[in-house]
């Protein structure tokens, strides 16, 4: 029902975001509240991601970009980092099996060069399948991703490109991990934190932000509906003048 309602409004001026980005935060606190190790929170968060990605696909969202592991998250204990990498491995292995059936393309964004050879091989396999899919929805998993790091890398790649064009915003965008994708319309951060934490710094210049206290493992389809509904009420001006509302 909710799906139908949101698609119906699409033709009436309130459109479904093409690109939704999520900072999947609050896994540790979710586990702590239950007296469980933080790693149990990450496992629960991974399940939430599977569910929400399927929901976004059903809604017809074109891009879902999630922050799974930041360039700063290496500061955590080795146990926690390995647990997160283990969950990523499990997810990618499943994706190799199910991607065609599930109809969601998967891309990994970030500096993957420092990940284990095993993970890198899985990412390469997923990306090879990716090229053969013609589905509407793409899920971008940001792993060892940092917005500043991404910009520095883009500038370096541009500077060393023998065919580089004169630098402009549009040209630089082509060297980002998100090259060719629209900027996120909506950035959601659960868990009560209201900061960007080095996520999509360039791309979120005109994104709408939605914050909720819900911890990521508890995030449901209803929370996604609430975020989309809030987004649909926003007036995006991009520095221009407010458009007069139709009577
Ligand atoms: C987000 O949950 C997942 C990662 C950063 C990898 P956290 O692990 O940051 O959970 P909290 O913020 O400690 O609750
Ligand atoms: C941001 O969450 C990174 C991810 C969700 C992967 P953090 O928990 O690392 O961010 P801070 O430390 O609260 O800013
Ligand atoms: Mg956190």
Image (tube, rainbow, N blue to C red):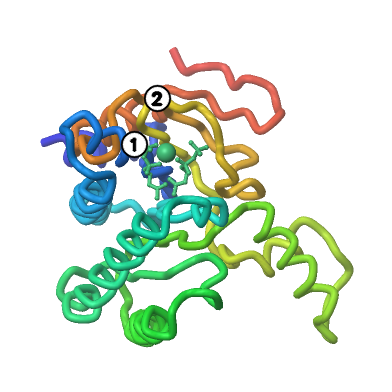
**Left or right of 47 on screen, residue 243:** right
Nearer-N-terminus badge (2/1) = 1
* Residue topped by disc 2: 192
Residue drawn where x is 24% and y is 74% of the image: 95
**Left or right of 14 on screen, residue 98:** left
**Left or right of 193 on screen, residue 54:** left
Disc 2 crowd rating (10 Å Cα; few below 14, some 14-19, many 20+) is few
List the single residue furthest toward the right: 166
Q: Can the viewer see residue 42?
A: yes
Q: Is mark 1 within 8 Å of ligand 1?
A: yes
Disc 1 crowd rating (10 Å Cα; few below 14, some 14-19, many 20+) is many
Q: Quadrant of residue 16?
A: top left
Residue 33 picture location, percent across and down: 21, 29
List the single residue furthest toward the left: 1
* Residue topped by disc 1: 26
Residue 245 picture location, percent across and down: 50, 17
Residue 228 picture location, percent across and down: 34, 33
Residue drawn where x is 32% and y is 66% of the image: 88
Q: Which is more toward the observer, 90 or 77?
A: 77
Residue drawn where x is 59% and y is 55% of the image: 146
The disc label shown at residue 193, or none: none
């Amino acid at each position: 029902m909710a799906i139908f309602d949101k698609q119906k409004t699409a033709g009436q001026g309130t459109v479904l975001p093409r690109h939704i980005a999520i900072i999947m935060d609050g896994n540790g606190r979710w586990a702590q509240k239950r007296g469980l190790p933080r790693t149990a929170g990450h496992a629960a968060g991974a399940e939430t991601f599977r569910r929400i990605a399927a929901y976004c696909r059903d809604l017809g969202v074109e891009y879902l970009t999630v922050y799974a592991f930041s360039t700063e998250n290496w500061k955590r204990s080795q146990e926690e980092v390995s647990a997160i990498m283990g969950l990523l491995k499990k997810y990618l292995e499943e994706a190799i099996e199910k991607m065609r059936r599930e109809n969601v393309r998967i891309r990994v964004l970030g500096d993957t060069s420092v990940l284990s050879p095993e993970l890198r091989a899985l990412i390469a396999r997923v990306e090879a399948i990716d090229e053969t899919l013609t589905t509407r929805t793409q899920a971008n998993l940001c792993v060892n991703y940092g917005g500043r790091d991404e910009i520095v890398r883009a500038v370096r790649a541009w500077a060393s490109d023998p065919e580089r064009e004169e630098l402009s915003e549009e040209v630089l965008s082509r060297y980002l991990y998100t090259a060719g994708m629209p900027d996120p319309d909506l950035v959601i951060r659960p868990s009560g934190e209201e900061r960007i934490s080095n996520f999509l710094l360039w791309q979120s210049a005109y994104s709408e932000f939605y914050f909720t206290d819900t911890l990521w493992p508890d995030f449901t389809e209803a929370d996604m509906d609430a975020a989309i509904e809030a987004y649909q009420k926003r007036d995006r001006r991009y520095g221009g003048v407010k458009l007069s509302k139709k009577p």
